Image: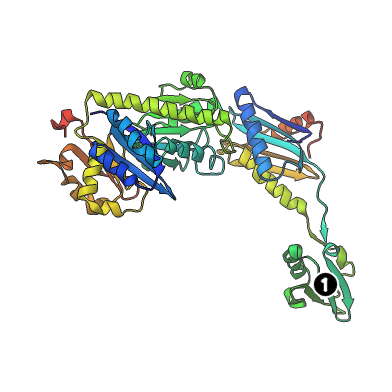
Amino acid sequence: MPLDHFVVESPEAGAVQAYIDIANDVLLDHTLAKAVAKLHIAIDPEYPLFIAVGTLGRLPPLVRLRDFADVTFEPGKVKLGINEETHLAALLDKLWTRYGKNRVDQPDRWTVEIADQPDLPVDRDLADLVVSDPTEGLVRDLIYALLSIAPEGFRVREHMYEKGRFWLASSENTLPDDLQARVRALFAKMGEVAP
Amino acid sequence: MILVPITYKGGVYRHDEIVDLIADLGGYVIQKHVLATEVVLLCLVPRDDIPLIERVGKPLGGEVQLSPLVGTEVAIVTPSLSIHHLPHPACDIAEYVRRIGAKSNMIGLARGYGKRVAQTSAEEREIINEHDCAVFLLGNFESCIVEKMEALRRGIDVPIILTGKPDADVLRRAIDPPVAGYVGNVGRFMHRTKEADELARLDAIVAEIVRVLDLRREEIAKDPLSASPARLMAVIQEQVPEVLEVTSPTPVTVQIAGLRVKLPYEEFADRIRSAEVEEGVTIGRIADVLPSRMRDYILVRIKPSSETDVVV
C-alpha cells in the first residue's frame, strides 16, 4: 500500500503481521488506500486497547453550487439550471432548510426555482453555496474501516477528525485516562501533531 | 465389511448405474449433487470394491477420491456473524471442509467476541453438541484466545479443534485443560484464501479434523454402535418416504454416531422410532430419537451395542 507511514505495533509480535494484512485488506476494500497518507496502529491485548492514528492525503475540494449548476437571477425568482444530478438531493435539502419548501420549486428534472421576494431576498452569492463536503463521507468511511480493523469486542469507542488528521480508540473496557497522551505519542511517532 | 468414505465425480449420463452398483455392493450414497452435467456422489462403500467402482465409472468419465470426512457433521464456530469474521475466514473454512465431504454448519455466536465478555448461550452449546466436532475460529492474540476459550468451551462435550494466529505448539502449551486439536497460523484475516500458503492452512485444518474424528471413531469402535448411521439413513428413507421430499441438500445428515433427520419432530418422531431395521428391531430400540435444537429437526443418537445387546 502506498502510505508514507504504515506501522502496526503490539506487545504480541505474532499478531503484528496479521493486523498489517487486515488493515491493508480493509483499506483497499473500502478504496481508502489512496486517501490515507499515514497510519499508525497500536494494539494492547492486555488492557485491551486499540488506537489508530493517521493523516489523510490531499483532501477533495468542497462542492459548490456553481460547480454543477447555472444560477440566473430573474425578476421574482432565481433559476438554477442543473448540469449534473449527483448533488441535487443535497442541494434541495440545503435550499429547503434555508428558504423553506414553499419557496423552492422544481418544475422539471433539470430546473430549480427559488422565489425571490423583496422582504425575503435570495442570497446574491448563492453560486458560492457549499452543497457538500466529500471529506465528510470520506471520514465516515474511514471510521467504519477502522472499526472493521479493530478487534470486534471493542465496543467502547471514541474518535476524532480535524483538518486531515484523525484518531480512533476502542476498547472492551472504559478507555484509559491517559488516552490523549497515548494518542499524542503515536502522532509524534509519525512526525505529526495530534489534533 | 469395512465401509470407506469416498467422493465419486462424473457425468450425469448413466450415473444411475454407479448409484445401483454402490447399493448392490452394500454401500450407501450419503449425498448426491447434480451440477449441470456433473454429478458428485458422497458415499460409503466397501473398501475392497473401490477398484470395481473405478472400473465401472471410468467409461463414464468418473473419478473416485477418498474423502475422509464423508458421513460427518462439523460445527464451524465463529465469535459472531459480523464483518470481522465473515465471509473470511469462516465461510472459506466451512466451504473447504464441505469439499472433503463433511456436512459443515456455521455457528455464529451471539456474544462470542471480546475476551472479557465472551460467552455462549445454552442453545448455542446444545446445537454445537449435536455435531461430531466443533472447530473454533479465534483471532490473532494468544492472551485473548486463552482467556476466551475458558468461557467458550464451557459445556461443550464434543471434541474441539481450536484455530488461531499463534502457532499450534503455542496454542497447545497455552490451553489448559487441552482440547482435541490445534491449528495455528490461521487467526482473523479479511481476504479470500486463494494463495498456496493459505490453502495449505485450510488443508492443515482438514487434516486436524480428520485426525480428531479418527480418534473418535477408534473410541466408538471399542464399543461398536448397534447399527451403522448410514444403514439407518437407508431405513428412514425407505420407511419414512416423506423425507425424500425435503428440499434441504441433506434431508438425512449422517454423523459418526447418529443422524439428523430434517423432518418435524412432533409429526415424525414416533414413525422413526417404530421404523424396523430388521425383524423385531426398531430404531427406537437401538437409538434415542430426540428433538434437535436446530429448527424442529429430529436427532437420532445410536446407542452402543453394549447398551442394547443388538448389532444389526
- Position of B176 with respect to B114 (left or right) is left
Q: Residue furthest front?
A: B59
Please name the residue shown 39% across and 25% down the image.
B211
Of B34 and B61, the residue lying toward us: B61
Q: Mark 1 lies on which chain?
A: A
Image location of residue B86, percent across then percent down: 53, 42
- Position of B197 with respect to B172 (left or right) is right
Q: Residue furthest bottom?
A: A75
> What number of labels is visible?
1
Please name the residue shown 41% across and 22% down the image.
B178
Kind of residue at badge 1: Leu
Please name the residue shown 30% across and 44% down the image.
B17
> What quarter of the picture does the N terminus of chain B occupy?
top left
Residue B132 in view of the camera: no
Image location of residue B67, percent across then percent down: 38, 32
Which residue, given by chain and number where applicable, does mark 1 sit on? Answer: A80
The residue carrying pointer 1 sits among few (fewer than 14), some (14 to 19) or many (20 or more) residues within 10 Å by Cα, namely: many
Q: Is residue A155 above or below residue A178?
A: below
Image location of residue B81, percent across then percent down: 50, 44
- Position of B141 with respect to B299 (left or right) is right
Of A188 and B87, the residue lying toward us: B87
> What quarter of the picture does the C terminus of chain B occupy?
top left
Please name the residue shown 74% across and 62% down the image.
A86
Residue B92 in view of the camera: yes
What secondary structure is marked by label 1? strand
Image location of residue B236, percent across then percent down: 23, 46
Of B204 and A154, the residue lying toward us: B204
Q: Which residue lies furthest to the left in this view?
A: B280
